[in-house]
Image (spheres, rainbow, N blue to C red):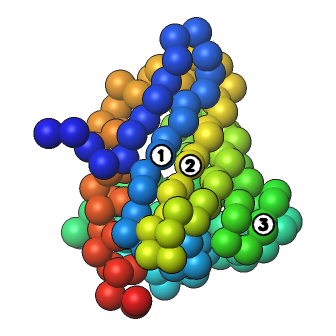
Amino acid sequence: MKLKTQISAEDGKQELTITRVFDLPVELLFKAHTKPELVTQWMGNRILKWEAKKHGSWQFETADPQGNVMFRANGVFHEFVLNEKITRTFEMENTPFDVQLEFFEFEKITDETSKLTMHIVYRSIALRDQMLQMPFAAGLNMAHNRLQDIVSKLK
């Protein structure tokens, strides 16, 4: 079965492109990426800090059912254009992965559908390839499916 969230990674490049079309107006898709109460629901994490604005910072963590922190990430919003784009850094704490640069573009297709394009740049090809060896694609697709389900109820 083909995943709805598509990941493209060209050989020899330290970047990847992720695309997904959602049955959501672009305003709701953007809101799902900027409102902490929504981010928490579809990503399954706990927001520690969330300043969704230019030069704002963010931090979240994910814990197992017993409350043990499994993953913590943080970054800074560098560009923030309502319903159009977000540029931010993303750093996983206490991992061998270096900080990455992420460009999110939100595109209106129709009044009820929109497209998300994420362009992620890694420090090296090796780090990008290491990320792709993890269950990254399946996890992102599951998160995007949750985003679609949760946010569609806000229509």
Q: Which mark is residue 80?
A: 3
Residue 105, compared with residue 47, is above or below; it is above
Quadrant containing the C terminus in the rendered view? bottom left
Snapshot quadrant of residue 24: bottom left
Reading the image, the residue beneath label 2 is: 117
Can residue 128 be seen in the rendering of this structure?
Answer: yes
Q: What's the residue at 54%, 36% (across, down)? A: 17
> Residue 84: where, in percent of width, then height?
70, 65
In the rendered structure, which disc, 3 or 2, sits on the residue that comes first in sequence?
3
Q: Residue at x 45, y 68 (%)?
A: 113
Q: Residue furthest bottom?
A: 154
Closer mark to the observer between disc 3 and disc 1: 1
Mark 3 vs mark 1: which is more N-terminal?
Answer: 1
Q: Mark 1 = which residue? A: 19
- Res. 67 in view: no
Tell me the mark number nearer the camera, choosing from 3 and 2: 2
- In the image shown, does 149 or 65 lie closer to the viewer? 149
Three-letter amino acid code at the position of disc 1: Thr
Q: Amino acid at mark 2?
A: Thr
Q: Dot 3: few (<14), some (14–19), or many (≥20) neighbours within 10 Å?
A: some
Instruction: Say which quarter of the image contains residue 58.
Output: bottom right
**Amino acid residing under circle 3:** Phe
Q: Residue furthest front?
A: 110
| Residue plotted at (51% across, 76% down) | 111
Residue in front for this viewpoint, 48 or 104? 104
Q: Secondary structure at mark 3?
A: strand
